[in-house]
Amino acid sequence: MNPDEKKRLEACLAEIAEILYNNSPPEKIKTLEGIEIRVRSEMLEYISPKIALFFVEKVTGINTGRKRKLKSCIGFIEISKRQANRLGLESYKRLSPLLEKCVFLVCANESYQNEASRSSNVDGSKSRS
């Protein structure tokens, strides 16, 4: 990114931040946790899906067609069947590939931790965590 693009991006981000702040209930942004929750929810609902849609349309060259919702790490994304095919997504998938990987990792980690706990109960050994 060149310096002019960085300046333009920073100006756009400042404007977005101001809009989001002006539309935030004051009681929900009194703490850092409240600010984090508010910013994250706004990013997932409004900003990230629009940026993703822009990328999808640029990469696939397709901006028409019947849309379907796909849950992703950056919020819900609406893509057409042709866009999905061009991006290598399987039909009827409701999760993005990255979100699916994250879910599998969390499940595997949880399963591993549960198994270590069950093993220590059975043989009296302690897990190395």
Image (spheres, rainbow, N blue to C red):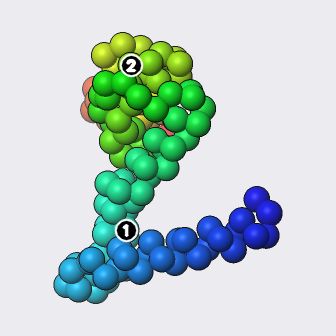
Asked if residue 111 is positioned above or below residue 55 in the image, the reply reads above
Given this view, does label 2 or label 1 mark the residue nearer the observer? Answer: 2
Q: Which residue is mark 1?
A: 39
The image position of residue 89, as x and y in percent, is: 45, 19
Q: Is residue 5 visible?
A: yes
Question: Which residue shows up at 58% across the image and 36% down it?
Answer: 58
Q: Which residue is mark 2?
A: 81
The front one of 56 and 65 is 65
Q: Name the residue type under label 1.
A: Val
Q: Is residue 115 visible?
A: no
Dot 1: what SS?
Answer: helix
* Labelled pair 2, 1 in contact (Cβ < 8 Å): no
3 relative to 121 in the view: left or right: right
The N terminus - image quarter: bottom right
The image position of residue 110, as x and y in percent, is: 35, 35
Question: Which residue shows up at 36% across the image and 13% down it?
Answer: 91
